[in-house]
Image (spheres, rainbow, N blue to C red):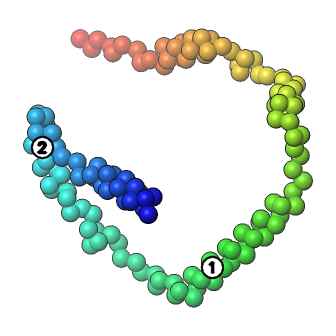
């Protein structure tokens, strides 16, 4: 009962956030309020395109739901048959992964420091800057 009361109280506290009021002291307040009032009713159902396809029957929806349940069960069965290779010791696993990553050579571009990368970015931006306009007098 207490949890229900707390949950309801939390939801009603959030509802106030959707009724934001315009700050009257702001210089753009009249324009903002005019835009809010003009668009208060948008979107209307009439603004949405009509559906030309027939809505599926409840039996068809139920069949699709059952199909998803069956395929979900099949997937769960396949996952349960996977031979997960766990070492049991997270530190040993991390060390093994670190060793495998260290064994792969790193591209020279990737080995650059943050300062080198920022300098490269700065130089590239300088080269990409447009030249000054030509004086046409």
Quick one: quadrant of the C terminus? Answer: top left
The one of 135 and 122 positioned closer to us in this rendering: 122
Q: Which mark is residue 31?
A: 2
Asked if 20 appears above or below 28 in the picture, the reply is: below
Quick one: quadrant of the N terminus? Answer: bottom left
Task: Answer with the quarter of the image where residue 59 lies.
Answer: bottom right
The answer to whether 5 appears left or right of 18 in the picture is right
Asked if 14 appears above or below 50 in the picture, the reply is: above
Tag 1 secondary structure: helix
Q: For residue 126, say whether it is visible.
A: yes
What distance separates the C-alpha of mark 2 from that of mark 1?
A: 50 Å
Marker count (numbered): 2
Tag 2 secondary structure: helix
The one of 55 and 133 positioned closer to us in this rendering: 55
Residue at horizontal 52%, vertical 14%?
122
The answer to whether 49 appears left or right of 86 in the picture is left
Mark earlier in primary sequence (2, 1): 2
The image shows residue 95 at horizontal and vertical percentages of 85, 28
Pointer 1: what residue? 64
Residue at horizontal 43%, vertical 59%?
2
The one of 85 and 33 positioned closer to us in this rendering: 85
Task: Answer with the quarter of the image where residue 8 lies.
Answer: bottom left
Residue at horizontal 33%, vertical 15%?
133
The image shows residue 40 at horizontal and vertical percentages of 19, 58
The answer to whether 23 appears left or right of 94 in the picture is left
The answer to whether 102 appears left or right of 22 in the picture is right
Asked if 36 appears above or below 73 in the picture, the reply is: above
Circle 2: is it few (<14), some (14-19), or many (20+) Cα within 10 Å?
few
């Amino acid at each position: 009962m207490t949890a229900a009361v707390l949950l309801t109280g939390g939801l009603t506290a959030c509802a106030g956030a959707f009724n934001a009021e315009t700050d009257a002291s702001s210089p753009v307040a009249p324009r903002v309020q005019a835009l809010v009032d003009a668009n208060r009713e948008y979107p209307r159902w009439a603004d949405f395109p009509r559906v030309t396809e027939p809505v599926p029957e409840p039996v068809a929806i139920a069949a699709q739901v059952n199909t998803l349940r069956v395929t979900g069960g099949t997937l769960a069965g396949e996952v349960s048959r996977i031979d997960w290779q766990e070492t049991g010791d997270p530190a040993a696993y991390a060390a093994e992964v670190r060793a495998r990553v260290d064994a792969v050579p790193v591209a020279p571009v990737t080995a650059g420091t943050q300062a080198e990368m920022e300098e490269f970015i700065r130089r590239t931006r300088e080269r990409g800057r447009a030249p000054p306009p030509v004086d046409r007098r």
